[in-house]
Amino acid sequence: MKRIRVFFRIVFLLLFMLPSFCFADNTLSEALSITTTSSVPFNMSKRFKLPSGSKIGGYFIYSDTIPDRVYSNVQLTKFTRASTDPARGAILIVKFMIPNSNRVLILVSFGNFYGGDETRVLCVVNPDGTISNTLLASVAGNEAYVKQCRINAQHQIIVTTIMPYSLTSIPFNTFTSFDGHRRDITYSINDQGQFVQVSVQDYYGKAYTKTYLEDLSVNLWDGRETSC
């Protein structure tokens, strides 16, 4: 099973990442000019892929305004910085237009695509190429996902997070299961280019196994948990 997951990651890298290595010194503005604009609704699923012919912006030079944390525990309190290893990002994968705005929304990836340690961050980009705001959109550690997001037809972002009850650190590379609950938070983007929380939906808790969280065929919003 693990070999299959690694195979999918390698295929993704070959299809979308390898052509971007020649753009490793691009500025964000240059990477934006390369990236194909995607449409909504858009599910950033574990297996998400861009339409045929789409181009990604690839590696680009980024500033501290984009958090580049790659997490090592389920609580998302322990991490390393992707900036310590240029091969771990940043990679501009997706770009969206923001309605009635001259800003754009992008998805930036940091981490190790072969090992399944990846963080994806949504960023609102101003016309001058600066970052207006960021939002943690997806986290996987040792191939187990605890955060994913979707963008609906109204350009709202729904971030689904699996939150453990325990305050004791649960390392991604050793856990087999933990008790926790799901939380969906919906955000919109205001006229100032800021993510604004619209609503919060909590779900009753249950046990989450590593097997479930790393299953590429099941996204976190597919869990069928009962809402509170």
Image (cartoon, rainbow, N blue to C red):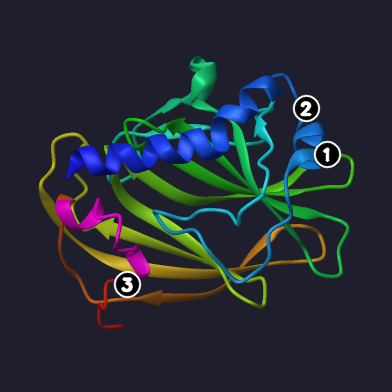
Q: In this view, does 182 lie above or below 144?
A: below
Q: Mark 1 points at which residue?
A: 129
Q: What element carries label 3?
A: helix
From the top left corner, tell me how far across and down residue 177 is, in percent. Answer: 11, 52
- Are there few (<14), some (14-19), or many (20+) residues within 10 Å of tag 3? few
Q: Which amino acid does label 2 sit on?
A: Thr
Is 117 in the magenta?
no
User: What's the residue at 49%, 58% (across, down)?
Assistant: 44
Q: Label 1 to label 2, Cα distance in Å?
A: 9 Å
Give the quarter of the figure containing the C terminus.
bottom left
**Mark closer to the chain start, 2 or 3:** 2
Disc 1 to disc 2: CB gap under 8 Å: yes
Quadrant assignment, res 224: bottom left
**Mark closer to the chain start, 1 or 2:** 2
Give the quarter of the figure containing the N terminus.
top left
User: What's the residue at 18%, 52% (across, down)?
Assistant: 166
From the top left corner, tell me how far across and down residue 201 is, in percent. Answer: 41, 77
Q: Which amino acid does label 3 sit on?
A: Asp
- The magenta segment is 211-222
- Are there few (<14), some (14-19), or many (20+) residues within 10 Å of tag 2? some
In this rendered view, identify the residue nearer to me: 182 or 22: 22
From the top left corner, tell me how far across and down residue 126 is, in percent. Answer: 83, 47
Q: Label 2 to label 3, Cα distance in Å?
A: 37 Å
Left-right relation of 194 to 118: right
Q: Which amino acid does label 1 sit on?
A: Gly
Q: Mark 2 points at which residue?
A: 27
Q: Mark 3 points at which residue?
A: 222
**Mark closer to the chain start, 1 or 3:** 1
Disc 1 to disc 3: CB gap under 8 Å: no
